[in-house]
Amino acid sequence: MADAIYEMKLLQKEISKREEQELRRLWQEAFEEEEAYLDFYHRYHLHHNRIWTLWDGERLIAMLHANPYQIQVNGALLQSCFIVGIATDPRYRRKGCMGRLMNTALRTFQKEGMDFVYLVPQNELAYLPFGFQTIGEQHTWRRPVRHDELVRWRAEEEAQMLPMGLPGLPGTLSLPEYRKLPGTFLAGNLIGKKSSEQEAARKKRAGGEGTDLIREGQEPPAVWQEQLPEQINLLNGELEGERLAEFANHWLESQAVSFTFRDAEYYQKRAAECKAMDGSLYVLQEDGQLSGVAGLGRKGQFWMLYDPVGDDMLEALEESDEWEPVPEPKKIMLKWLGENNRLGTLLPFIMEELS
């Protein structure tokens, strides 16, 4: 059959139950993800991404997901997308399906003025014809999971508890324990006031005019609790996510010219992703102050540490006898969509962040 008969659909925001089932089926067939992770992805990303798809009648045969991100480069925010979930039903491969989806997505991004897109491929050669180039490697840390450790972890999770310390990394605290310390997120008055507009927005959400939105022993305002997904109790409302983002952005600005810009939603999604992988967000604290943050999740027989931020966190990892860098880091490929004369100036900074 010629691929021209296949119907192309762009899915975003309003996705039918049938379309969601087909997206889940193809993702599971292509990537063999655990059900908990699929639940996370569909809940937190599916309706916020753009998904280009091809259909043979009622059957989904190919898809491409685009997750939007902002990359701060030398003080300026560049618009970007992380392309994931690229998959074709095995019975429809070698029919030009992926070429149609990729070319359509890239033309759309370029027309919109997006600066660049990037991906982590399973096969680098497949993306060279589309103008992608390998720019670096994606580094993560790992340590083996001990059987008794995993059994204890799951037993504690049933009681909505998490271990105090990050396995194999002394000095860390899970967020549920960290927030109990004096002077942190939910154990005192509002910390780190922002602009008058942001403060006014917080007051409106809290339903009051005072500046002390959260006091010691007080639950987050009901309006915030209603916005939190049922399956995640690791971030108590917007204030906590903003606090983590403020710390991370401040540290990254001191370390690199470019970095992925964080906000409250970034860490809410990260916490949910870790929970779906039997983990949590973990922090380091010094004198009651946040000094490091990272996400922990389980992949097979290994604990994986993602997105470590802060000098203390990196030093703890480097000094640990149990944690080690993943020996075969994944490649990162990028396609520049902006003006060509900006590529030579900005690409090294983008490479520094993405690798």
Image (cartoon, grey):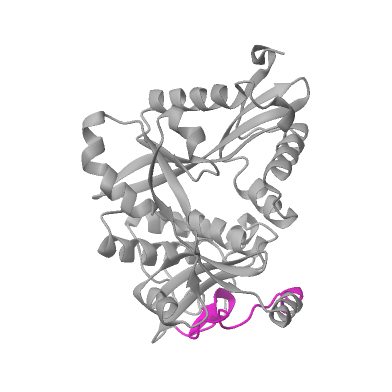
Give the main secondary structure of the magenta stretch: loop
Q: Position of residue 105 (x, y in %)?
A: 50, 27
Q: Position of residue 62 (x, y in %)?
A: 66, 29
Going 33% across and 56% down the picture, which residue do you hit? 196
Q: Does the rendering let one see residue 168?
A: yes
Judge from the rendering whether residue 308 lies leftward or rightward of residue 85; answer left or right: left
Going 25% across and 43% down the picture, which residue do you hit? 346
Task: Determine if the magenta segment contains residue 315.
Answer: no
Q: Position of residue 110 (x, y in %)?
A: 39, 26
The residues colored magenta run 156-182
Going 72% across and 78% down the picture, which residue do you hit? 147
Judge from the rendering whether residue 282 lies leftward or rightward of residue 109; answer left or right: right
Q: Tell me the quarter of the picture where residue 259 sits.
A: bottom left
Q: Tell me the quarter of the picture where residue 193 sits.
A: bottom left
Q: Position of residue 162 (x, y in %)?
A: 65, 77
Going 27% across and 47% down the picture, which residue do you hit? 348
